[in-house]
Image (tube, rainbow, N blue to C red):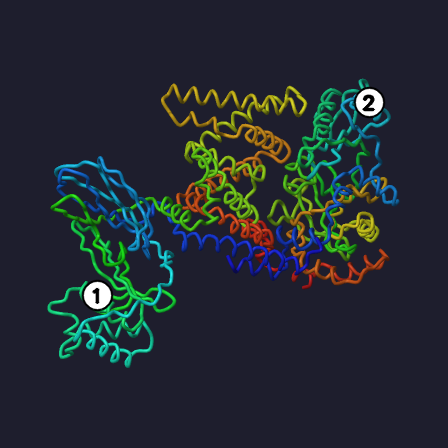
């Protein structure tokens, strides 16, 4: 009241704020927590299985295996250990995380499994501490001189640890003609040798560096190779380099497994140790992944997720959350289209009942119920009952009709008729009462028009509320209801014509004014 | 379709949404609604202000009061029963006469005969809120039954024609007359098939006719031409409508007036959300006139307001009339 143009802005600003909050939360959950926007949109996960087999000499056996701990770009969804007869612990050691299996007495072939399921999580970054400067390596001559010369040369052509490393790896990759590099690398160097040599030179230049080992999880691999990588600290954070090509960065599908010089697996008291790493990619329910991710982030958003509710309550809220959207449709159909209905939100409740009956049966049952109820109501008019007893009688008739329809359809073998019990009976009663009054006072055409309007709105609500995408979105992202609210507020200030008014005022369109 | 919207905009047709947000919400404070939604309060207000209304015979407030009906209308041959909170003419029952031999037999205006128990049932329905908005408990008014002014004898099938004037900030901006038909069963309700005829604010002469949403030239039952009927005491009638602004404080109000053979123009009821069909039979949009009235200075002299309105909101002659 007394709103004027400022009031209009108020509504628009409020709608804007609500939309921003709703969409912001939505975007956060999608982008940062990875909640799925579409239903049945599966998240890729990789199952990495490491199998350690060995032949135990009679006696105690102790096996240690590095397992993923700090994994930039990935997060662990699930992991398990299969080790019959062995006890195990998973301590953190200098190279990362380990599983230590031990048994007092073992003999013959043994197999230990470690399985981890990981998913991509771009928010998971290196959260390691800043390492101390490494001690300058003491090498025998002529290696020491060669090392010093390389440091001098590379330093001359670089500005910071990152460019130093890049330049050094470049030289290590193409040692042709460079005697010092060839001397340090030794004959036929592999990737690990190159990484070790680089670490030695980097240590001489007081740049902390370490060896990282990981595996490529891009696709299915029966026997995955453990790939060395070089990690260099530039004073602020860890940088990754390919020790062979010198390229900076981690490949997208590189799962960091452990760090340092120690071997991946060590077994005491056994022989014939064999290690096999296999990778399998599969899909998982994205919501499970998203929740795990939010838990890992200790994120408050996830704690307020509807998934935290018991399953039965989840089902209830799955329905309830669609109601505001149905209300928005009612607002649209009434104020923009101009459809007339009995009762403001009666169609939404009818639409909820349609969820069980399906549309065609719902419309048929609704029509039949209203039609028969109306006949009774007209008969009751003759009995001259007071209003409330009359309503109560119609209500009783409605309930009896529901029972009758259920029994009849059950006898005929129509399962669908049983769901008639879900119709909101009080709402049906009021609809019948309103319809009979409109029928008497305004004539049958108005009553039928409004009845059909109610059905049309109910069917529209049902169709929209029943969309899988809509159900999914409102349930996973209840904050989107703020956007619905914003749209409703804006429609509340809609001053344009209703579609039906174009028809109603058709005389005003034609001819001279 | 965009063309249709543009045409309606150009002709200043006011839509429901715009009427609600830009006029009703702005000009009619909600606390004033009860003054017009309750016909009893409107009537009391009008009587206190010396505005002519149909005489009130009695009020039935409780089921027990229904028994006093005979007492209340003992000396009346005819009377009207109205729910105080009815809308759109719902629940109105007009008793046109009583059997001379047994006074508890009532003859309604449409010819039906009812006994006291049947009338009592109708009263009971009114009390229980069947005709009130939201189904709240209501009271029933017993009042004077309007006698149709003979000037309408050719324009009216049963019932009583009713004049609707839209008054914005005390300035009458548009008017129409609703003429009952056989189809409307004697009710002056456009939705039920009554004829709507535009009234020239300047002269009080009917202009164009509409049945439903379509143009009509002749009255469907009597065949009389709808246009050209001049209402008597037009200036007085506009003044009566304009006074309802001061009476209620509503800045956008629909005033329903009837012409009684004996008492002349009487205020029947007021409406805080008057309908929009008045635009069709006037072939004019409400928006330009309402905007015009909004821009006019606040004027306390009713005669000045009426004169201003008659000057500003005259219906322009049709090309045919001009020629």
Say how many tags the image has. 2
Q: Secondary structure at mark 2?
A: helix
Q: Where is residue A99 drawn, in percent x and y?
A: 27, 46
Residue A66 in sight in this render: yes
Residue that label 1 marks: A196
Placement of A201 over or under A461, stated as above or below: below
Residue that label 2 marks: B68
Image quarter in which the C terminus of chain B is found? bottom right
Label 2 resides on the chain identified as B
Q: Is residue A457 left or right of residue B57?
A: left
**Quarter occupied by residue A182:** bottom left
Q: Where is residue B152 drawn, in percent x and y?
A: 75, 43
Label 1 resides on the chain identified as A
Residue B232 in sight in this render: no
Placement of B298 over or under A416, stated as above or below: below
Q: Where is residue B159 drawn, in percent x and y?
A: 73, 36
Of B308 and A83, the residue lying toward us: A83
């Amino acid at each position: 009241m007394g709103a004027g143009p400022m009031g209009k802005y108020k509504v628009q600003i409020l709608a804007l704020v609500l939309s921003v909050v709703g969409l912001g939360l939505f975007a956060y959950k999608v982008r940062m927590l990875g909640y799925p926007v579409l239903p049945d949109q599966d998240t890729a996960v990789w199952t990495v299985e490491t199998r350690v087999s060995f032949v135990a000499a009679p006696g105690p056996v102790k096996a240690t295996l590095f397992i993923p701990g700090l994994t930039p770009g990935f997060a662990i969804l699930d992991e398990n250990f299969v080790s019959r007869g062995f006890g195990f612990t998973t301590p953190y050691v200098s190279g990362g995380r380990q599983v230590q299996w031990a048994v007092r007495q073992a003999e013959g072939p043994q197999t230990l499994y470690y399985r981890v399921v990981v998913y991509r999580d771009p928010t998971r970054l290196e959260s390691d501490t800043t390492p101390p400067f490494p001690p300058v390596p003491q090498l025998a001559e002529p290696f020491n001189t060669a090392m010093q010369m390389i440091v001098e040369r590379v330093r001359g052509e670089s500005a910071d640890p990152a460019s130093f490393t890049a330049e050094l790896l470049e030289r290590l990759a193409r040692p042709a003609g460079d005697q010092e590099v060839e001397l340090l690398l030794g004959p036929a160097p592999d990737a690990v040798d190159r990484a070790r040599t680089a670490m030695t030179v980097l240590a001489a230049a007081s740049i902390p560096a370490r060896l990282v080992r990981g595996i490529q999880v891009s696709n299915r691999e029966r026997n995955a190779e453990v790939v060395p990588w070089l990690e260099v600290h530039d004073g602020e954070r860890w940088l990754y380099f390919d020790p062979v090509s010198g390229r900076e960065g981690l490949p997208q599908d590189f799962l960091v497994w452990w760090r340092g010089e120690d071997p991946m697996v060590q077994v005491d008291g056994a022989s014939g140790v064999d290690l096999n790493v296999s990778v399998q990619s599969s899909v998982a329910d994205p919501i499970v992944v998203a929740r795990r991710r939010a838990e890992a982030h200790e994120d408050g958003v996830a704690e307020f997720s509807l998934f935290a509710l018991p399953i039965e309550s989840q089902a209830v809220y799955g329905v309830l959350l669609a109601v505001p959207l149905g209300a928005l449709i009612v607002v649209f159909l009434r104020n923009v289209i101009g459809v007339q209905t009995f009762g403001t939100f009666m169609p939404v409740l009818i639409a909820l009942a349609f969820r069980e009956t399906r549309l065609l049966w719902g419309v048929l049952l609704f029509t039949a119920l209203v039609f028969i109820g109306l006949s009774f109501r007209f008969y009751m008019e003759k009995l001259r009952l007071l209003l409330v007893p009359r309503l109560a009688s119609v209500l009783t008739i409605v309930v009896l009709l529901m029972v009758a329809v259920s029994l009849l359809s059950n006898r005929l073998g129509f399962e669908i008729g049983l769901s008639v019990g879900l119709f909101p009976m009080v709402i049906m009663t009021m609809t019948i009462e309103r319809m009979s009054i409109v029928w008497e006072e305004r004539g049958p055409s108005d009553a039928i028009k409004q009845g059909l309007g109610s059905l049309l709105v109910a069917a529209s609500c049902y169709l929209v509320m029943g969309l899988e995408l809509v159900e999914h979105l409102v349930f996973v992202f209840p904050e989107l209801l703020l956007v619905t609210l914003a749209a409703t507020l804006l429609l509340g200030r809609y001053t344009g014509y209703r579609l039906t008014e174009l028809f109603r005022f058709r005389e005003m369109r034609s001819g001279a004014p | 379709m965009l063309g249709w919207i543009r045409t309606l905009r150009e002709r200043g047709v006011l839509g429901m949404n715009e009427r609600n947000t830009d006029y009703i919400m702005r000009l009619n404070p909600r606390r004033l609604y009860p003054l017009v939604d309750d016909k009893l309060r409107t009537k009391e207000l009008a009587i206190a202000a010396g505005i002519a209304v149909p005489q009130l015979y009695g009020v039935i407030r409780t089921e027990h009061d229904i028994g006093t009906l005979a007492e209340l209308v003992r000396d009346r041959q005819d009377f009207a029963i109205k729910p105080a909170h009815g809308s759109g003419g719902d629940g109105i029952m007009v008793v046109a006469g009583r059997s001379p031999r047994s006074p508890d037999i009532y003859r309604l205006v449409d010819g039906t005969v009812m006994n006291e128990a049947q009338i009592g049932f109708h009263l009971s329905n009114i009390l229980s809120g069947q005709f009130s908005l939201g189904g709240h408990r209501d009271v029933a008014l017993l009042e004077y039954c309007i006698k149709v002014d003979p000037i309408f004898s050719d324009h009216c099938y049963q019932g009583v024609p009713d004049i609707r004037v839209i008054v914005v900030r005390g300035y009458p901006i548009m008017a129409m007359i609703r003429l009952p038909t056989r189809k409307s069963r004697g009710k002056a309700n456009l939705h039920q098939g009554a004829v709507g005829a535009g009234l020239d604010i300047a002269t009080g002469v009917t202009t164009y006719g509409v049945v439903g949403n379509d143009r009509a030239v002749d009255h469907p039952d009597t065949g009389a031409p709808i246009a050209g009927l001049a209402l008597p005491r037009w200036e007085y009638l506009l003044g009566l409508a304009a006074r309802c602004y001061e009476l209620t404080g509503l800045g956008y109000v629909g005033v329903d007036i009837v012409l009684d053979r004996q008492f002349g123009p009487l205020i029947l009821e007021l409406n805080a959300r008057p309908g929009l069909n008045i635009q069709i039979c006037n072939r004019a949009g409400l928006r330009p006139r309402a905007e015009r009235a909004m821009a006019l200075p606040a004027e306390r002299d009713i005669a000045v307001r009426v004169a201003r309105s008659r000057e500003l909101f005259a219906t322009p002659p049709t090309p045919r009339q001009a020629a």
